[in-house]
Amino acid sequence: MHLQLPLNVLETIPSLRMTQGTPFEDKILHGHIALGDRHWYIAEYSIKQRTFYGCSTIDGTDEIAWDYFCLDRLCEPTVEQSREFMYDSSWTARPAKMVLATRR
């Protein structure tokens, strides 16, 4: 399974730890990736490591967790992944509080 995010989007995402002092709700979420009812929202990115920092839904619920996630690891095939990852190309960057409010 392969997921390629647009370069123009990746170039706008702050490097890992660049928003470290920003409260979670004020972090800007620059991208959205989905697989079924699981969602990942991107706040920071390392081009070299292909690693993101952001928030994601937990096991398809509305519960949110902030953590690092690796694009390559997300795309590793597993038995339960019968669907493709989707990058939301219509996504516009917005503060996490706006996104998280709609998930509650």
Image (cartoon, rainbow, N blue to C red):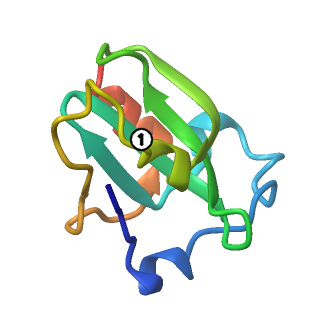
Q: Dot 1: few (<14), some (14–19), or many (≥20) neighbours within 10 Å?
A: many
Q: Amino acid at mark 1?
A: Trp
Between 91 and 86, which is closer to the camera in this rendering?
Answer: 86
Residue 83 in the figure: left or right of residue 34: left
Report which quarter residue 100 is drawn in: top left
> Which residue lies under the disc numbered 1?
40
Q: Position of residue 71 (x, y in %)?
A: 52, 54
Report which quarter residue 48 is drawn in: bottom right
Residue located at (41% from left, 14% from top): 63
Between 2 and 11, which is closer to the camera in this rendering?
Answer: 2
Q: Position of residue 19 (x, y in %)?
A: 75, 54
Q: Secondary structure at mark 1?
A: strand
Residue located at (57% from left, 36% from top): 25
Of all residues, the one furthest to the bottom in this rendering is 8
Between 44 and 20, which is closer to the camera in this rendering?
Answer: 44
Q: Position of residue 82 (x, y in %)?
A: 17, 35
Quadrant position of the N terminus in the picture: bottom left
Vertical comparison of 75 with 4: above or below: above
Residue 74 in the figure: left or right of residue 51: left
Q: Position of residue 45 (x, y in %)?
A: 64, 62
Between 60 and 17, which is closer to the camera in this rendering?
Answer: 60
Residue located at (26% from left, 24% from top): 80
Vertical comparison of 87 with 64: above or below: below
Residue located at (35% from left, 63% from top): 3
